[in-house]
Amino acid sequence: MKIIPKLGLAQKSDPKIITYTDEKIEKLTGNAPFAAVIPTVADVTLKKDAFETALAASNTSLKNQLRVDLEEMLTLQAYDCVKIASSDLTLYLTSGYEAKDTAGQPTGELDAPENILFRNYGKNSGQLILHHGANIPEENLHYFLTQSMPCHPTICC
């Protein structure tokens, strides 16, 4: 099983990133399989403490740089935990890091598409703009177009 860390660091506020980091430090401290994790717990603790100090001092530029550094360290540490766990999800989860659901959930057979219209031809050669009429955000849809008929000489080729 392929393990992909689930971090979501960019969505966390500054105080939440401190709490999140503290949770990882607590889970990894004394956790024998992850004793050699890189970056080390000590390095992450030092970076988190520096970030917390800059946050308290209202030193915005330093705080922002330290946050970037801390996020990078947490990301590297999560991926090193993946490497150490070697596809053992149960072991990986003891590190305190979460994993993305790579298996997904089966949806079953989808209904056949209906009421599909091509309202215009788009700005690029060969582009068609599809209007499906469904109340579904566009970013949730994927379209695949195949050509099952020979190309008509007056339309393409």
Image (cartoon, rainbow, N blue to C red):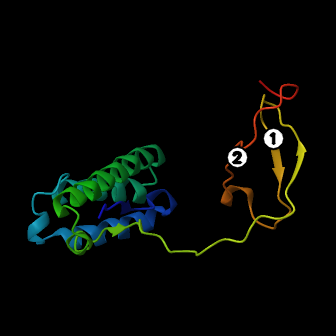
Q: From what the image shows, is residue 80 above or below residue 6?
A: above
Q: Is mark 2 on a helix, strand or loop?
A: loop
Left or right: residue 107 compared with residue 39:
right
Whether pointer 1 and pointer 2 mark residues with C-beta atoms closer than 8 Å, the reply is yes
The quarter in which the N terminus is drawn is: bottom left
Along the viewing direction, whichever of 112 and 60 lies nearer the viewer = 112
Left or right: residue 33 compared with residue 45:
left
Residue 29, located in which quarter of the rendered image? Answer: bottom left
The quarter in which the C terminus is drawn is: top right
Q: Which residue is drawn at 46% across and 43% down?
A: 61
Q: Which of marks 1 and 2 is nearer the N terminus?
A: 1
Q: Which residue is drawn at 22% across and 60% down?
A: 81
Left or right: residue 132 compared with residue 55:
right
Q: Can residue 54 be seen in this view?
A: yes
Q: From what the image shows, is residue 28 above or below residue 49?
A: below
Q: Residue at x 42, y 69 (%)?
A: 103
Q: From what the image shows, is residue 27 above or below residue 21?
A: below
Q: Distance between the residues labelled 1 and 2?
A: 10 Å
Q: What residue type is labelled 1?
A: Leu
Along the viewing direction, whichever of 112 and 93 lies nearer the viewer = 112
Residue with the mark numbered 2: 145
Along the viewing direction, whichever of 94 and 28 lies nearer the viewer = 94
Residue 84, located in which quarter of the rendered image? Answer: bottom left
Q: Which residue is drawn at 20% across and 56% down?
A: 83
Residue with the mark numbered 1: 128
Q: How crowded is mark 1: few (under 14 residues within 10 Å), some or many (20 or more)?
A: some
Residue 142 location (% of width, % of height): 66, 54
Residue 113 location (% of width, % of height): 77, 64
